[in-house]
Amino acid sequence: MKKVVRTVWISVLTGLALLVVSCTSQNRIPRKVKKELMAERDSIEVSISESKEREAVYWGSPYMQDLNNYDNLSMKRETCNTLIEIKKEQVAMYQRLNEINSILGKNEEALENEAFSNKARNDIQRIEDILDHLVPPCVYGPPPTDR
């Protein structure tokens, strides 16, 4: 009788252990997928830093220092459009980074990336406002004459 009880007890414990393992392993990511996601996350972070460096170069150009000056308007417009494109790329990269961090369970980093994404969206709005104000003043009437 002892052997039967022991065998049943071991079988019940084994079944429970199997049940616990099967229920908890659903949320786990395989190592291979996790490595791929980590590698993609690292490459996206490198791409973001490179795009920030490109952005700094465009903002640092001499004709962008004085936005109230109406010289080089076409270059300022082109630069602003390029900056908008760079910022949109950054928003897309931050969103992908946010997805990866959510999958990997790094919620703090996901929230941080969301904040950076919102900042990039605000920068896009600011650059669009700059573009709207890059209109030279209109002067009506005949040119002044010397008398």
Image (tube, rainbow, N blue to C red):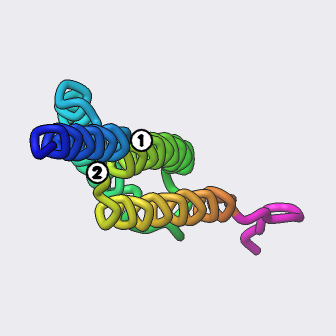
Main SS class of the magenta portion in the image: loop
User: Residue 60 location, x and y as percent?
Assistant: 29, 57
User: Residue 7 location, x and y as percent?
Assistant: 16, 37
Going by the image, does 95 lie left or right of 50?
Answer: right
Inspect the magenta stretch and tell me whether residue 146 lies in it.
yes
The correct choice, above or below, for 68 with respect to 86 in the image is: below
| Viewer-proximal residue among 133 and 85 | 85
What residue is drawn where x is 49% and y is 40%? 85
Question: In which quarter of the view is residue 103 placed?
Answer: top left
User: Residue 21 location, x and y as percent?
Assistant: 27, 42
**For the image shown, how many numbered marks are present on the structure?**
2
**Magenta part of the protein: which range?**
137-147
Q: Callout 1, which amino acid?
A: Arg
Q: Which residue is mark 2?
A: 52
Q: Secondary structure at mark 2?
A: helix
The correct choice, above or below, for 3 with respect to 134 in the image is: above
| Viewer-proximal residue among 113 and 139 | 113
Which residue reaches farthest bottom? 147
| Viewer-proximal residue among 16 and 43 | 16
Q: Which residue is mark 1?
A: 96
Residue 77 seen from this side? yes
Inspect the magenta stretch and tell me whether residue 63 lies in it.
no
Which residue reaches farthest top? 32
Going by the image, does 92 lie left or right of 32?
Answer: right
What residue is drawn where x is 50% and y is 44%? 88
Q: Quadrant of the C terminus?
A: bottom right
